[in-house]
Amino acid sequence: MSTLLDKREATINAIINEKNAIAVERDALEQQVVNLKQRCHSLSPLGMEIRAEDQNATELMVRLCEKEDQLQQVTTEIAEKAQEITNLHDVIRDLRDVINEKNRIIDDLNRITSEKEWNLGEHRQWLFDANISIKNLEAELSNIREEVNSNKMELDRLNTELDEKNGNISQLHNKIAELESEAINMQYGKELSPNQVFNFWICYSICLKNDFFIL
């Protein structure tokens, strides 16, 4: 747009120079006409020289009219070109206003983009920290599960051992009941065999060892 404006202004300057040249020629022709008229008045009305001067004056008047027409055309063209330049200035002003508005919008967008990028950086850091926390929690959960499984296995072992102990205790109950019965019979005068006495003391020792007392 600036290049176009420069070309228009150069055209107007050329036209103005042409106008000035035509104006100079016109002024010279006008002066020649004035001089011829003065000479005509100073000569005799019947002389041949007057007719020649009249013819020259007529030719000069024709040329003067032509220059006047050219000058008018150039003046009109200058006015048209000047209006074109005025219009171009208006267009340039409007375009500059549009460009300024676009630049303002771009600045706002850049500011918003910077803010969004900063917020995105915060969110990425938060996500990174959250992922680390999740991994730590998953590792901790895995350790807890392993511990639970280990405790469950230990509980199963203890339950099995307890079942075995309960089975042994039940057997001892039965054995003690038999020995008590035999002891009662012995109190009524029945003697125990050496083997029965030995079994009684063994069961009694086992009960003491397992903290199992029967009152």
Image (cartoon, rainbow, N blue to C red):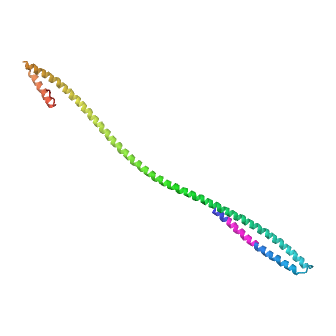
Q: Residue at x 12, y 29 (%)?
A: 205
Task: Return the residue nearer the eye: 7 or 37.
Answer: 37
Q: Which residues are magenta?
A: 8-22
Q: Is residue 75 above or below residue 204?
A: below
**Image check: 121 left or right of 55?**
left
Task: Return the residue nearer the eye: 109 or 18.
Answer: 109
Which residue is at the far top? 189
Residue 32 appears at what percent x and percent y?
81, 77
Q: Residue at x 41, y 49 (%)?
A: 126
Total number of numbered labels?
A: 0
Which residue is at the far right? 46
Residue 189 appears at what percent x and percent y?
6, 18
Q: Residue at x 57, y 57 (%)?
A: 101
**Image check: 35 left or right of 17?**
right
Q: Is residue 60 above or below residue 171?
A: below
Q: In the picture, residue 212 is in which quadrant?
A: top left
Q: Is residue 205 above or below residue 184?
A: below
**Image check: 63 left or right of 82?**
right
Q: In the picture, residue 154 is in which quadrant?
A: top left
Residue 38 appears at what percent x and percent y?
85, 79
Q: Is residue 77 above or below residue 167?
A: below
Q: In the picture, residue 174 is in which quadrant?
A: top left
Residue 88 appears at what percent x and percent y?
66, 62
Quadrant (top left/top right/bottom left/bottom right) for the C terminus: top left
Q: Main secondary structure of the magenta part?
A: helix
Q: Is residue 26 magenta?
A: no
Quadrant (top left/top right/bottom left/bottom right) for the N terminus: bottom right
